Amino acid sequence: MNLRKFNKLQSALTLLALYLVAIALGALAYHLSGNFLDDVLVRLLIADIVATLLVFGFGLLIRNSSAYDPYWSVIPPVILFAIVGILQVKITLGSAMLLGAVTLWAVRLTINWYLNWEDFSSQDWRYTMIHDRQPRIWFLSNLFGIHLMPTAIVFIQLIGATRVLAMEPGFHPLILLGFLMSLSAALIQYVADRQMMRFRLTHQGQKACIEEGLWKYSRHPNYFGEVWMWWGVWIMYFGASGTLDITLIAPVLMTALFLFISIPMMEKKILLSRPQYQEYRSRVSVLIPFFPKRKLASGSIETDSDPDHLSL
């Protein structure tokens, strides 16, 4: 059976079945690892890796690594609700805010993935580029770079969240702040994605660069929303624990992933087809929304606010 010939609905139902099997296999791995491990978090990591490997294997079978794409948003709430069940966590105001924020983010991001996804015939351009550049090590790049590394990064984000659930926290101003940050992150991503979708529809066939709405203040407001989301989750952890510890590396790592890998890769691709993007790039903040610079008659650039401010 050639899955690449499936239409979008057939492809989506196949992926749904795949992910249900992956979650079930992960649950089995969690159960079996209890024979030699006591640490719940380590056992969950093993389960996460096992589920990832199944999705990886399916991607190899159909020769399309984009089967992994929704994993980023689907698995986090699965892990957190698993913690609730495993530890028999009492749902308090603090834990409810955390679960609600992550679930809302996950549902919105998964829906957006589906709206932009075609079917098994399409693969993320970045995966194709990685394959074409280094075909001899594609298996390793695919396994570690495309599958296991993102799984690890997202799992690291969830360490603080699992601790919050175990604490069963009540109300705390910082938990509320983190919750509001995470909600605003989902809203920012939703608005940015809607604006981009509308822009693409009204500029079909044109090599145009979006500079409207949120995209006027950040070159990547959708990425900013993703980073902001995980800073919000960490703030909730900090509010619940009152401890500044190694978990801070989680949002820092997520920020670095976008600043030093995802954004440079994306902008390099854009510049190849839209040289005018360089001018937009020189005026607009890379990630954190801020007032754009504007051209002067002389061709120099100044900011719309404090002239001494440097674009972030």
Image: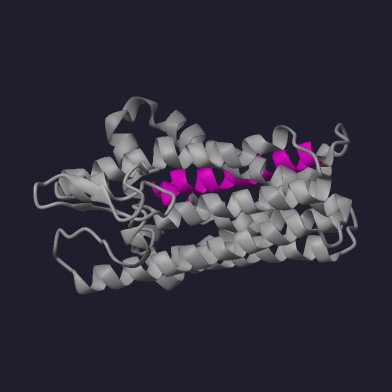
* Quadrant holding the C terminus: top left
Q: Would you say 73 lies left or right of 262 here?
A: right
Write the residue at 18% across / 47% down: 279
Task: Say which of 161 and 238 sits in front.
Answer: 238
Magenta span contains residue 297: no
**On the image, which quarter does residue 73 sit in?**
bottom right
**On the image, which quarter does residue 130 sit in?**
top left
Query: Could you tell me residue 31's position as x and y percent?
Result: 82, 45
Query: Could you tell me residue 114's position as x and y percent?
Result: 45, 66
Task: Say which of 133 and 90 sits in front.
Answer: 90
Q: Would you say 188 lies left or right of 282 here?
A: right
User: In this rendering, does residue 166 appear at all?
Assistant: yes
Q: Would you say the magenta stretch is mainly helix, strand or loop?
A: helix
Farthest-out residue, top: 136
Write the residue at 57% across / 38% down: 252
Q: Is residue 86 above or below residue 97?
A: above
What span is colored magenta in the figure? 41-67
Query: Could you tell me residue 150's position as x and y percent?
Result: 54, 41
Q: Would you say 39 lies left or right of 286 here?
A: right
